[in-house]
Amino acid sequence: MNNISYLKEKFDEIQSDSSALAGIRNKAFASYEKLGIPSVRHEEWKYTRVTGIFNDTLKIGAIHPVSVEVEDFESLRLPGYESANQLVFVNGVFSSGLSVILSPSLNVSSLEEAAGNEYSEIVAKNFNNSARYIDDGINALNTAFIHGALFINVKKNKAVEHPVYIYNITDARSEAVLSQPRSLVHVAENAQIEIVETYHTIGASESIVNQVMEIVVEKEAFVYYYKIQNDTTHASQVSTTHIRQVGKSFAQSVTISLSGNIVRNNLHMVLEAEFAEAHMYGLYLQKGSSHVDNHTLVDHAVPNCESNELYKGILDDNSVGVFNGKIFVRKDAQKTNAFQSNKNVLLSPTASVNTKPQLEIFADDVKCSHGCTIGSLDPEALFYLQSRGIPHKAALALLLQGFAVDVVSQIKPSAIRTYVEEMILERLSAEA
Amino acid sequence: MLRIENLQAGIEGKQILKGINLDIKPGEVHAIMGPNGSGKSTLASVLAGRQDYTVTGGSVTFEGKDLLDLSPEARAAEGVFLGFQYPVEIPGLSTTNFVKTAVNEVRKYRGQEPLDAVSFLKMMKEKMALMEMDQVMLSRSLNEGFSGGEKKRNEIFQMAMLNPKLAILDETDSGLDIDAIRVVATGVNKLRSKDNAVLAITHYQRLLDYLVPDFVHVLWNGRIVKSGTKELALELEERGYDHIKAEIGQEVEA
């Protein structure tokens, strides 16, 4: 997107109620002008080419009003929706009309509003923290176009009794659209929340979701975050999830990537309080010419924290997987436990994966390990199953399911876990 | 039941089986013994359909069907079972799920309805007791972290669940202490009937103390060079394979 004059025009159309946000937006736009969309020369984008998808035909979703009706949306709902809070973004703009809040412990408002009310301090303190970790134009582009952003607060001492389903809908029925959802989630002391996020493109034009979600976790709080990516093959996304643990707390993220054109996930776990615990799981199951890139970053800023990471990939046809796992252990972060593992199975000779663990350890009393594997399925295992009467195709599906199970089993809400298991089984049975 | 005629097979261009002849009838237990490298495991692999091996001549008929023409899964469904020398560890797949899938796939092949949960559980409990296994073991990932003895017990448990017509046990005794051998052999004995047969492949005679064979064959250099009754196994144990080699070496070379 080099059409700066178009972007500038659209940028000016967004009037921010909050002067605090206006300042951040202005700065971000200037950043974008300077940085632009990263090319493969950018170290963090070496294996993922996005200059082609961020092209000049894209319209900024936030200022192209669309009407997604309840009927359009109904078929997209996830199992268990009857007893889930439902938050909906349309083309990157939070739609309170389509949203349903069941849990009184959940405060939901627009970010613009929160920046000016009793939450202004929380917003000021935590908003856009992710920019400290990403120096590229894509993150700046999201921030520059903040409009209809979401603020969630989970009240102190409350566990949100229903999971929060967040639907990101992009209406690409009439034109190619760039959706840029933005949200800030604040989980107060001793609170708990489960978030399930999905992405759906309606219509046949190209779409990109450029999302940034920042989650702040206070002491004794628990966050479970699930991302399910199963959009169309003309839908791409850059999805940044920035989880910052400012108190001794627990955070878990599970990312399931099943379909899409180019999918890039930036997952950050920033551990800023002692004895915080972060768990990251990922499964990417790709076919066709899909490209999925998981960039994860764990920042051990203080002592006595634990992080644990397991990403698994199954790649068929011409699909491409990228895994980059960065772990920082700062000088003061003694007694850190940090584990990372990335395992890949290639089902076709033309599928590929680039995996790169990146550990930067500045403390001297830590336990850190990492490992990665790339292989094909063990023919002896396949023969073992066949020799018991299980046909080749079913045997392949069983083996791959077994490979995926330690990631999928981490999904806590059973309706979602079953849904994911079924989708995977269906895919594996069809593929084998 | 099984008729092997002049079977020749090899791997990567190397000829290993050089003309095997063997006839197994229902109710019989056959033992194939032989030194390392004689082709014992190759024979088991070829019968079960392991793809690395190429059959270059001869035929194998099982219940009137050309066995070599069938996929490994079809052979299993027809009633051939291979007990692996090295059972494979499969992370993420529980033994229960594995066996249930296998039993129902075999039933499907035979045109039967899948077993309902209650009948399956009942059958599983019965066979678990037979092999002295517990529920915890079966809900763990298949063979993962199992001891050698547990793996082999699991093999015979699977055999019990599939109830094959012909069980080929490929060095089931290797790596097992005498107590484990006893459990495994007792399990196999309990599964024997006048309608099924066992082909036990072993290097040592120990297993045959418990699994008493009707016939013993000595495999050497890709051929069955001597056949006899269970006394042959004892003789081999006592006098060693070198004795047999010396005895028949001349004619084999000729």
Image (cartoon, rainbow, N blue to C red):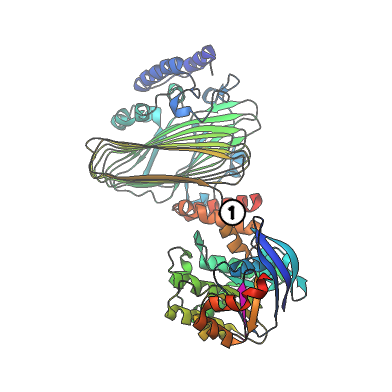
The residue closer to the viewer here, A272 or A11, is A272
Give the magenta-colored segment's residue range.
B214-222
The answer to whether residue A148 is seen in the rendering is no
Mark 1 Cα within 10 Å, few/some/many (few <14, many 20+)?
some
The picture places residue B236, in percent across and down from the top left corner, at 54, 81
Question: In the picture shown, does residue B188 fall above or below A101?
Answer: below
Q: Position of residue B180 (x, y in %)?
A: 45, 78
**Count of numbered marks:** 1
- Is B228 situated left or right of B174 in this image? right
Query: In the figure, is residue A10 to the left or right of B48?
Result: left
Residue A59 seen in render: yes
**Residue at the spot 26% in from the left edge and 44% down from the top edge:** A366
Image quadrant for the N terminus of chain A?
top right
Query: Measured from the top left, where is residue A321 in percent x and y?
Result: 53, 38
Residue located 61% across and 49% down the image: A427
What subunit carries mark 1? A
Front residue of this view, candidates B207 and A20: B207
Decide: is A14 above or below A325: above
The x and y percentages for residue B51 are 65, 59
Q: Is residue B219 magenta?
A: yes
In the image, residue A361 lies in the stretch drawn in magenta: no
Predominant SS of the magenta segment:
strand
Instruction: State the image quarter where residue A76 is shown.
Output: top right
| Farthest residue, direction top | A5
The kind of residue tagged 1 is Leu
In this orientation, which residue lies closer to the viewer: B78 or A138? B78
When the figure is inspected, residue A341 is found, relative to residue A176, above or below; the finding is below
For the residue labelled by badge 1, is the local secondary structure a helix, a strand or a loop? helix
- Report the residue marked by disc 1: A425
The vertical placement of A171 against A194, above or below, is above
Kindly indicate the quadrant of the structure image that contains residue A50: top right
